[in-house]
Amino acid sequence: MNVSVVLFTSDLRLHDHPPLRAALDGSRQVVPLFVRDRAVAAAGFAVPNRLAFLADCLRDLDAGLRERGGRLVVRSGDVVEEVCRVAAEAEADEVHLAADAGAYAQRREERLRRALEAEGVRLHVHETVTTAVDPGAVTPASSDHFSVFTPYFGHWSRQRLRDALTAPRTVRVPDGIGSEEPPSRAGLSGLSPELASGGETEGRARLTAWLRSGIEAYEDRHDDLAGDATSRLSPHLHFGTLSPVELVHLARRAGGPGAEAFVRQLAWRDFNRQVLAVRPAAASVDYRARHDSWRSAPDEVEAWREGRTGYPVVDAAMRQLRHEGWMHNRGRLLTASFLTKTLYVDWRVGARHFLDLLVDGDVANNQLNWQWVAGTGTDTRPNRVLNPVTQAKRYDPEGEYVRRWVPELADVTGPAVHEPWKLPGLDRAALDYPEPIVELAEGRERFLRGRKS
């Protein structure tokens, strides 16, 4: 064979890229292709923060390919039509693609396979590109997937991971294949002011710094809201500028409790994908327990979105989301619990808002984590309710995180910032900050009544 096409999707990197390596090993020339999918835009998934990060990733990928003698071919339109068109232009024998667990990706793969076969072109789908362990590799004897994380993690941990691949030295692209200019974040409106930069170069630099000075303390500090001691690698995992296989290998090589805790989080990511792979409806339908009594509370939902609930730690996390396009993991748990269990609002409302802003907005992780918190998903304790005041005192004991994001409370010192309604009258009146929109006890009781109904 002479030419292969590599379709990049959520694997925008050159290091540890099995589809690219297979294409280079089997072909004289390769067309690295990315299609700006109009179906993704039509579905409302192409939001400003992710479009900007994607633009960074594509420009960096193109730069990396050019350093190796190649280039990235960018097209826009229907993915199947554009892949077939490029394969015909290049007279390609094969197309290589990373597997994906989502329902849309599975439908796309099947459409692509049929269309390419009709043209005499073979499609090769590669596993463990976007996950460390293939979604179908770990299954219990009595079911098609694990519905609880702990037993899944036990089996996942015993899997032998493939070796990580080095980046190619040379990529030869055939002449005459037309391409659009890779997109740029310049001109995009509605971006979070402190949105992180994307691309494999940025991701690998962040990974190197994390392994050098962050991972060792991860077990002790990953819930520290003010300390911001998480890896912040989730956007790079979402867009595939970093390889989960390589991350697991590097973390295990680092060793220690922090590395073990970090690997466990990577396993959670794979866990959600194996659930979604066999239960694709879980992206929008209650996975386990159904709730039919969710409240419609538009004013309270708007207060939650704006970070004006009167509960400082909830408001701080929601403002961080809007400002950075990212939120601390503990903040995600607290804000989701507040919406679904204290306000008793449908998890889909919150999941949609997160997807509108999160640069790492990922259907498997976002939707299934929201279900976990809401009590409709894989949590074995669906009635647990996170008290935002208790949680704030535990994970932001001096109130530094709250004061960073809620400037109205900047002059309230120490842990008192978590309960501004308890301040003396004059001090409280001077604050431009709302009263709590709901009593915690009232919200908890309402949620438990709804669970019983």
Image (spheres, rainbow, N blue to C red):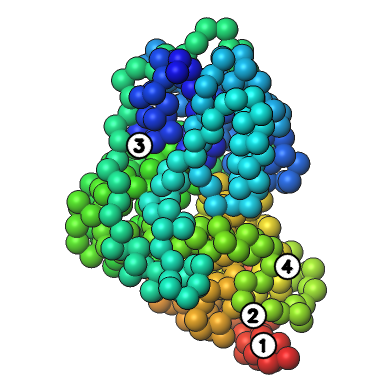
Q: Residue at x 34, y 67 (%)?
A: 155
Q: Which mark is residue 301?
A: 4
Q: Amino acid at mark 4?
A: Val
Q: Is residue 54 left or right of residue 446?
A: left
Q: Amino acid at mark 1?
A: Arg
Q: CA distance from mark 4 to mark 2?
A: 23 Å
Q: CA distance from mark 1 to mark 2?
A: 9 Å
Q: What residue did someone put label 1 on?
A: 451
Check disc 3 and report its element: helix, strand or loop: loop
Instruction: Please provide percent x and percent y for residue 101.
Output: 54, 52
User: Badge 3: few (under 14), some or many (20 or more) residues near its Cα, within 10 Å?
Assistant: many
Labels 1, 3: front one = 3
Q: Amino acid at mark 2?
A: Ala
Q: Nearer the viewer, residue 408 or 211?
A: 211
Check disc 2 and report its element: helix, strand or loop: loop
Is residue 349 in sight in this rendering?
yes
User: Badge 4: few (under 14), some or many (20 or more) residues near its Cα, within 10 Å?
Assistant: some
Q: CA distance from mark 1 to mark 3?
A: 46 Å
Q: What residue did someone put label 3 on?
A: 16
Q: Is residue 342 left or right of residue 388?
A: right
Q: Amino acid at mark 3?
A: Asp
Looking at the rendering, in which quadrant would you find the C terminus? bottom right
Q: CA distance from mark 1 to mark 4?
A: 20 Å
Q: Residue at x 67, y 39 (%)?
A: 111
